[in-house]
Amino acid sequence: MKVCFVQKQIFPYFGVMALSGCLKKEGYETDIVIDACEKDMVSALKKAKADLIAFSVLSNEHGWLRQLSSELKNQIPAVPVAVGGVHSILYPEEVLALPGVDYLCRGEGESSFVDLVRCVALKRPTGNLPGICLKEDGRPLMRGVAPLTPELDSFFEDRSLYYERYPKLGKLALKVFISSRGCPFDCSFCANSSIMRIFEGKGKYVRRKSPRHFVEEIKNVITDYPAASLFFADDLFAMDANWLEEFGSLYKKEVNLPYICTARVDLLKEEHARFLAASGCHTVSFGVETGNELLRRGLLNKAISNKRIFEGASIIKKAGMKVQTSNMFCLPDESVEDAVATVDLNIAIGTDYMFTTVLLPFPKTTLAGYCIDKGLLKKEYSFEDMPNSFIQDSVLSLKNKEVLLNIHKVAHLCVRFPRMKPFLIQISRKIKCRQLFLFLWLCGTFIRFQEERKLTLWRTTRYLWEYRRGL
């Protein structure tokens, strides 16, 4: 029995690696085909000779899923198609209604998806599996949500799935890991707020690997696929001081590579920063989102004050680490002055690396509904209207939209070179040339990647080239 995973973007997906690790543990064979790395996806999937094709899909890839799954149903109709990922959890009816989709895994699949594979292998009925939705006489048959995986130490993520099929991914100097699942907060711009409600009553939502298991996982990877630095991309890495202290001691002795991690400034304390710095953390990343505190608290439902952002940044700097922030532009109700305030706040707190995106509301969410009510989105707004990128454009009909997009593109350059800020903001207000500002964004991104991830010029160029299709 062979399962071939399919995805559009080039970076390894944690859910896919977890499922591959569980399937291999049960004796099944796995493979991966990435659209961004293939010239002809259908041909690549035919050559894979899988018994089950499993898509992992982001919500802005709904159209891609519809088209490719339909082609596969025409070309290799005997091979069933299953779909999982966050998009399937949030919008199961829309996904299962697609003609090319046979099964949908709604929830974490370490148990339910493995059960589905076992049933397909043994040609057994799949109708009673928790979290597995299917079609009956061509009509979607919905099931409940699969229970949350209680123990993250019960498996290791299988990175060889990606690195053996696409060796260039294994050679990248930066490797990304996560130690936990779930976030306890309810920010309106994040899918977590909806997912948390969907999983209510299905087990503990925020879970974490033990420090020993996490260190062993890292060691297993970097032994075969060396790295220059790591990024711990948890929703919230720096949250438990006791866990950080134990992890930091093991990590320093047995791994000792520089790393970046995530935090939330209203939870960050000096002891957190002390443990992080002692173990090799060189940069802490947290969300500023916007310089307008009222927008952050009200629209985005993130109750963190500008004062607390200053205090959190100061704690990080005092411990000898650098600050990376995540920020959004083109928010509903955002003025040009608000966008400039986001830049100014980052300069004031001493941000070293400013990561920026353009807000992309997900259909049927509270935030999308707000935008529709304000006349910023059409009433029929759906997945078909979502762009592939969170970087280049905004779906909202905003006043001064072009200026907001321009400020987004030059924001990191303003923070990195504050003396250039007046000039960059002035041209953002007066010049209409998307190609120019995209070029400036690329320059800022190159500088940020090289400095933030401690990469050489060559490695930075190679890293961005590999990930260019997702920009």
Image: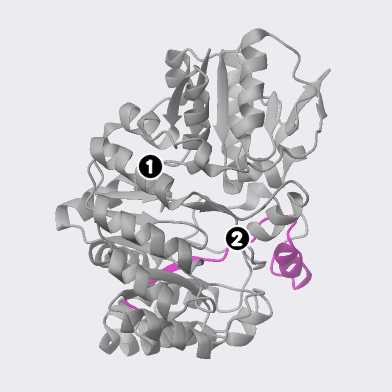
Residue 49 position, x and y percent, is 47, 12
Q: Which residue is pictured at 26% across the width and 82% down the height?
A: 417
Crowd around label 1: few <14 · some 14–19 · many ≥20 (10 Å): some
- Front residue of 174/240: it is 240
Q: Which residue is pictured at 63% across the width and 80% down the height?
A: 303
User: Residues under labels 1 and 2: Cα distance?
Assistant: 22 Å
Along the horizontal axis of the image, is 317 left or right of 121? left
Taking 76 as reference, is 266 above or below it?
A: below
Residue 205 position, x and y percent, is 66, 53
The image quarter containing residue 352 is bottom left
- Front residue of 343/197: it is 197
| Residue assigned mark 2 | 183
Instruction: Label 2, secondary structure: give it.
Output: loop
Q: Disc number at residue 217?
A: 1
Q: Which residue is pictured at 42% across the width and 73% down the height?
A: 272
Q: Mark yes or no: residue 255 visible.
A: no
Identify the magenta region. Answer: 351-377
Along the horizontal axis of the image, is 52 left or right of 233? right
Along the horizontal axis of the image, is 255 left or right of 72? left
Q: Identify the amino acid type marked 2.
A: Cys
The image quarter containing residue 133 is top right
Q: Is tag 1's residue or tag 2's residue first in the polypeptide sequence?
A: 2
The image quarter containing residue 376 is bottom right
